[in-house]
Image (spheres, coloured by chain):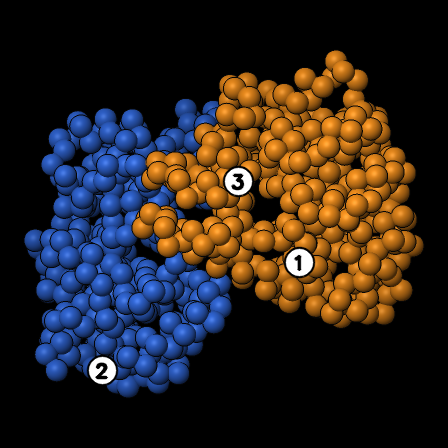
Amino acid sequence: MKLGDLSPRDLRDLLAGNTLVLRTGPFATRIHSPMPGIADGLLRLYPDFPLDDGDFCDFHVRVGPPTGIRRWLKPQINFWHDGHSPFKPLPANHAFALLEWGLNWCVAGHAHHYLMLHAAVLEKNGRAVVLPGDPGAGKSTLTAALMLSGWRLLSDEITLIDRDDGLIVGLARPVSLKNASIDVIRHAFPDAIIGAPAHDTHKGTVAHLRATPDSIARVGDKARAAWVIFPRWREGAEARLSPHSRADAFLHTANHAFNYSLLGSLGFELNAALMDACECHDFEYSRLDDAMRVFAELAAS
Amino acid sequence: MTAHTRCQPLLDVLRDPARMAALDLGAWDRLLRQAGAAGLLSRIAVQAEALGLDAALPDPVRPHLTAARTVATKQRQAVRWETRRVARALAGVEGPILLLKGAAYALADLPPAAGRLFGDIDLLAPRAQLGRVEGDLMLAGWHAGGKSEYDQRYYRRWMHELPPMIHLRRGTVLDVHHNLLPETARIRTRAEPLLADARPLPGFPGLFIPRDTDLVLHSACHLFHEGEWGHGLRDLVDLDAMLRAFPAEPSFWSGLLARAAALNLGRPLYYALDCCRRWLRTPIPDAIIADCPAQPPAWQRPLMRWLFDAGLASAHATCRKPWSGPALFLLFVRGHYLRMPWRLLLPHLLHQATTRDRQQD
């Protein structure tokens, strides 16, 4: 059964009754929430995702109002991972963004079966591109545009490399768009399905973009990486790939990974194998359609 | 509900790790959550591997166990590395400098070490050398300055330890003790016998670990004098592991009772033996419990069991039972009551309450 097969009312009941189990790639997450914003966001962004029977869940999360008198003064929202709340409460209308951050936190803090790089990853013709990027470099915008141009999204924030086979495992969760990139994507892809924006978060305005049906349907297909590309948006720049040293790419991804040092020598071996298998590039761009052309040529090469 | 039926399946698996082989997926869901919240997931993951169970585990479970083992391996490596830095920093101190609890278990490869997670590194130093120890650790980058002036005074005047010393670059935390319990505690004990009888830690010149009986007594007095029980069950598992292994030395039990009497720690030892037996089925001879010095009066025993059971079950929602809230509050109050007399405690709690309000405003 898919989440979108539920009526809005049934979905709200399941969420309120702590009986909704959402499967995103390798993870089953039980979500408990009385907040209408959570039900609305899930229906808009996760309708093609399968539901699990719920015998076993990797994560048990709750999004709801914190206890105490503040709940009556100024509506707030908090996130709990199995009874433990890792964040400070946020304004109540940030509920869905908080759920997304919370789900990222669950994976990044626990899934040490994988090497977890801070990078987006997409696939085309059986070859995956890993996109590490500093905040503000235009990684999410490029990721969204590539996905909406036919690349299969594996993940927007966390690249999971399976320790058993070195292959990349997908999540296909929504892409997090920030500030100006929300309108850039809306304008370039009018059919894109984007959730309600959360304003004035610590990342500015945030809105999430639904993954394409192909990305969700094929989330179980692991991918082999062929490129590591460091994107950078610069006003007026011509879209251009230039070589990036493998050694530097290794150090950059290791330094920004969620659990590189925790994995010890295994982290080194997995990341080294990734770099050995990949061409590494810098990629500068300013216009999305030029960027899409360069990536289409890359995929056809 | 008694301790026998509560906290399942975690308690069953802690008593007999081989039972992991027979759990269904629903039981695994509860086990991973209970063990994770109690800080014991890495321990059962290491036990599953040692028993060769990994290949037979359900597919969704295995990644959680490999992840938990990875965390434990990393922490053990990190504590070894950090302890080397401590040994180097304190090379000029006369000593002896003792490692306590987690770091001692890990570096001496004692029974609780398998899969154990760590917080801070606990050290015990002779009181007369405390100034030198603090100075030398400061030169190596650890600093006890993170607390307010009030907290500094509170620690240095009344407590059995310095304020936590935090490394400026790495953020690692050392707790430097000069006694097992606060100066103001209702039970008076002495650190000198522990220091005098400590054994050298191979490979770490200048560092020592307490002898077996003292490891048990320190763990017991730490657990049963605290007001915070978040790691209670993990600490009880430490005690269980030691009490199963140490009696291989035939004089262990008699030595333990004699040492408890000498250190004035009979009461916490009694609680430790009673809870280990009821919760983890630790094989402790009846005669040892009967001979334990300083037992609580009979009328207190059910009350104390009720309190400690609530504390030990507090880590995860599926272990708690009704009325655990008041029991945990009483444990918290008890922890403070044992720490210092009312004439010190009341002004201290008042200060803590008012400064917390100010921080929130």
**Quadrant that contains the C terminus of chain A:** bottom left
Residue A219 relative to residue B180: left or right: left
Residue B260 visible, this orientation:
no
Q: Badge 1, how many Cα within 10 Å: few under 14, some, many 20+?
A: few
Q: Which residue is mark 3?
A: B16
- Which chain can be seen in orange? B
How far across and down, in percent of the image, does residue B257 sit? 83, 36
In this structure image, what is the colour of chain A? blue
Which residue is disc 1 drawn over?
B109
* Relative depth, front residue between A58 and A150: A58
- Which three-letter amino acid code belongs to the residue tagged 1? Asp
| Residue B200 - label | none
**Is any atom of residue A225 visible in this view?**
yes
Inspect the image, locate mark 3, and give the three-letter code of the amino acid beneath it: Asp
Foreground disc of the pair 2, 1: 1
Residue linked to disc 2: A241
Q: How far apart in space, not on screen, are marks 1 and 3 (Cα)? A: 21 Å
The residue located at (37%, 61%) in the rendering is A114
Looking at the image, is mark 1 or mark 3 earlier in the sequence? Answer: 3
Report whether mark 1 lies on the same chain as mark 3.
yes
Establish if B302 lies above or below A47. Answer: above
Question: Is residue B322 shown above or below B121?
Answer: above
x and y, in percent, of residue B336 in the image? 73, 30
Q: A282 or A170, which is in the foreground? A: A170
Q: Secondary structure at mark 1?
A: loop
**Callout 3 secondary element:** loop
In screen coordinates, is B46 left or right of B305? left
Looking at the image, which is closer to me, B246 or B297? Answer: B246
